[in-house]
Amino acid sequence: MSNAPQKYDIGKHFEEEKDVDILLNVGQIAQNLLSVRRMTILLQWTYYILLHRTRMLLAELMFAMYGNANYEPDGDIILESTQIIPQTDEDCLDLVFDEPSWIAQKHRKIGII
């Protein structure tokens, strides 16, 4: 007896060549589905990495704008600071709208306006 692997002819078990074509098509479909699944996982991973980087950039932007890093867009980013900062978007807008009035009050006190 020989230990050499024997060639297996799958075609002899099917009566028509059409059956072999169907079997090969099923194999190709399975490969395509696995490829699509791998690509989906890769895209999901890339999405989460980009989302995390975007959140970190937002935190850095808030730090640059307000001199602190307590801005927490979703609660996952927690950075320490000793300064009081606006806690909501409305507070940020109040600071933007109030700043000219503060400047005007200072100018009134020194007689410019």
Image (tube, rainbow, N blue to C red):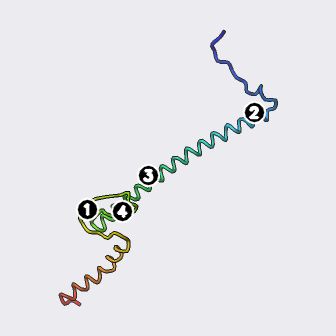
**In the displayed structure image, the side of residue 99 where residue 89 appears, left or right:** right
Label 4 packing within 10 angstroms: few (<14), some (14-19), many (20+): some
| Residue occupying image coordinates x 69% and y 21% | 7
Residue for badge 3: 49
Q: What separation in Å lies between label 4 and label 3 (alpha carbons)?
A: 18 Å
Label 1 packing within 10 angstroms: few (<14), some (14-19), many (20+): few
| Residue occupying image coordinates x 71% and y 39% | 25
Q: Report which quarter residue 51 is drawn in.
A: bottom left
Q: Nearer the viewer, residue 113 or 72?
A: 72
Q: If you read the primary sequence from the N terminus, does the residue marked by circle 1 or circle 3 appear first?
A: 3
Which residue reaches farthest right? 15
Q: If you read the primary sequence from the N terminus, does the residue marked by circle 4 or circle 3 appear first?
A: 3
Q: What separation in Å lies between label 1 and label 2 (alpha carbons)?
A: 69 Å
**Percent position (x, y) of residue 55?**
39, 59
Up-down relation of residue 64 to residue 97 (above or below): above
| Residue occupying image coordinates x 77% and y 26% | 13
**Percent position (x, y) of residue 69?**
30, 62
Q: Quadrant of the C terminus?
A: bottom left
Any mark on residue 56, and which?
A: none
Q: What separation in Å lies between label 2 and label 4 (alpha carbons)?
A: 59 Å
SS at mark 4 in the image: loop
The answer to whether mark 1 and mark 4 are in CB contact below 8 A is no
SS at mark 3 in the image: helix
**Percent position (x, y) of residue 73?**
39, 63
Residue for badge 2: 20
Q: What separation in Å lies between label 2 and label 3 (alpha carbons)?
A: 44 Å
